[in-house]
């Protein structure tokens, strides 16, 4: 064989024969030939199928529909779903509704709940954190969406009127790329709902106003809820920790109060996940904090502060319009005068107590002129 020098290296020389060079050229050109052959065969296939393209597309569409319907039918049977009733009359009435995802992931039996948005189209939902408020709202939206998509729904029965859109304002997150804070995102989403929702829309609002100060948040939450109930009259589920909003049910006929039930067992809390009429009796904030793993020393300190504030409010309630002694209050609570002063300032900022001028004798006029009293 005749060797031909091909490459010089630092410490070696590389040689090749004419036969090896021929094989190398064949290998390098084989890939290009394969791609060219593949393209040729593909073009021939397209030419042969061109006349049958329309029937093939119809067959693919039919198979897709059969696949979807078969899956929905299998899920309806295996998950105990029910055929919903779509009506022309306004209202949403769900009996024993469930959240399929939560039910599938939970190791415990899911607690089903009713949703009645017929006469009273807005529900003010109160209850402790982790009580199930968000799950209750989401399952209602999912049932409505599934019904309008032609699916069976996870409920004992469901009568659903016309719903044009579903709006949600749930969760808290910022938008760093756009430079928007959590509160800005919350208000932007709320504004979109107020501008575009109709009386046939389903609206889920979760903790409106929590991204700002207590008073601003309460004022915004109240105004949004009142606007939804008075003007838009949309189907609305409004979850909140502002217990003041429960007063709307006394002022508006289309607003109802419901709450997620929970009971205390010693120092712990047991969530029943049952929706019951009326507002919640308390928020169980300390119990939820303990359940989340907050150190016992912190919980104990919080309980002590809470007890002192409650006792102070009760003591002040018995002395409305009268002068009070910081020394007597300090002795009653077992704290110093400075602590009493800071507590009263806190209660004033929360509009729980109001301060009067010492010599005032006309309580009604003092209130009218916005002077603080306690």
Image (cartoon, rainbow, N blue to C red):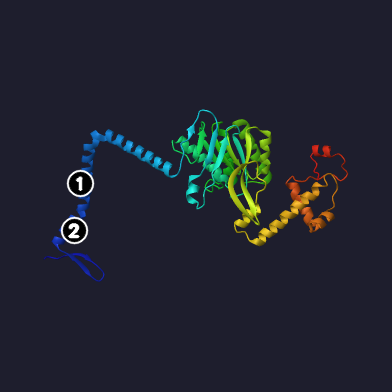
Q: In this view of the protein, which residue sits in the foreground, 136 or 219?
A: 136
Which residue is found at the position 57% from the left and 43% from the top? 185
Which mark identifies residue 170? Answer: none
Tell me which label, 1 or 2, sits earlier in the chain: 2
In contact (CB < 8 Å): disc 1 and disc 2: no
State how many labels appear.
Answer: 2
Quarter containing the N terminus? bottom left
In this view, which residue lies farthest toward the top? 88
**Which residue carries the number 1 mark?**
37
Q: On the rendered structure, is 72 left or right of 107? A: left
Q: Secondary structure at mark 2?
A: helix
Q: Secondary structure at mark 1?
A: helix
Asked whether residue 216 is in view, the answer is: no
> Callout 2: few (<14), some (14-19), or many (20+) C-alpha neighbours within 10 Å?
few
How much space separates mark 1 and mark 2, taking CA atoms?
A: 20 Å
**Which residue carries the number 2 mark?**
24
In this view, which residue lies farthest toward the left? 1
Instruction: Find residue 104 and report its horizontal and vertical position in percent.
Output: 47, 49
Instruction: Find residue 233 and report its horizontal and vertical position in percent.
Output: 59, 32
Q: In this view of the protein, which residue sits in the foreground, 78 or 43?
A: 78
Q: On the rendered structure, is 97 left or right of 243? A: left
> Callout 1: few (<14), some (14-19), or many (20+) C-alpha neighbours within 10 Å?
few
In front: mark 1 or mark 2? 1
Instruction: Find residue 349 and report its horizontal and vertical position in percent.
Output: 74, 47
When asked about the image quadrant of residue 192, the answer is: top right
Q: In this view of the protein, which residue sits in the foreground, 72 or 61?
A: 72
Instruction: Find residue 167 and report its horizontal and vertical position in percent.
Output: 53, 38
């Amino acid at each position: 064989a005749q060797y031909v020098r091909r490459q010089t290296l630092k410490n070696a020389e590389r040689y090749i024969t004419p036969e090896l060079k021929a094989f190398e050229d064949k290998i390098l050109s084989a890939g290009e030939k394969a791609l060219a052959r593949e393209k040729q065969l593909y073009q021939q296939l397209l030419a042969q199928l061109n006349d049958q393209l329309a029937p093939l597309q119809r067959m693919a569409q039919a198979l897709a529909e059969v696949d979807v319907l078969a899956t929905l039918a299998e899920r309806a049977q295996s998950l105990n779903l029910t055929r919903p009733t779509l009506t022309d009359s306004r209202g949403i009435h769900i009996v024993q509704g469930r959240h399929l995802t939560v039910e599938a992931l939970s190791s415990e039996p899911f607690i089903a709940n009713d949703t009645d948005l017929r006469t009273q189209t807005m529900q003010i939902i109160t209850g402790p954190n982790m009580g199930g408020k968000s799950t209750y709202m989401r399952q209602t939206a999912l049932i409505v969406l599934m019904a309008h998509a032609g699916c069976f729904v996870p409920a004992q029965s469901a009568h659903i009127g016309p719903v044009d859109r579903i709006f949600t304002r749930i969760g808290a997150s910022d938008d760093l790329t756009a430079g928007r804070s959590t509160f800005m995102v919350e208000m932007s989403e709320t504004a979109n709902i107020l501008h575009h929702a109709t009386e046939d829309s389903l609206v889920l609002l979760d903790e409106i106003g929590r991204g700002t100060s207590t008073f601003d948040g309460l004022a915004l939450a109240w105004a949004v809820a009142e606007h939804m109930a008075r003007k838009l009259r949309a189907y609305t589920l409004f979850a909140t920790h502002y217990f003041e909003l429960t007063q709307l049910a006394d002022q508006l006929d289309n607003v109802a109060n419901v709450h997620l039930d929970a009971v205390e067992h010693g120092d712990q809390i047991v969530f029943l996940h049952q929706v019951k009429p009326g507002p919640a009796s308390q928020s169980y904030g300390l119990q939820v904090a303990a359940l989340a793993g907050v150190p016992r020393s912190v919980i104990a300190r919080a309980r002590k502060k809470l007890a002192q504030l409650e006792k102070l409010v009760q003591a002040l309630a018995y002395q409305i319009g009268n002068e009070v002694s910081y020394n007597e209050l300090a002795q009653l609570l077992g704290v110093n005068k400075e602590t009493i002063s800071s507590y009263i300032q806190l209660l004033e900022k929360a509009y729980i107590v109001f301060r009067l001028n010492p010599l005032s004798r006309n309580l009604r006029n003092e209130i009218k002129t916005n002077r603080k009293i306690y």
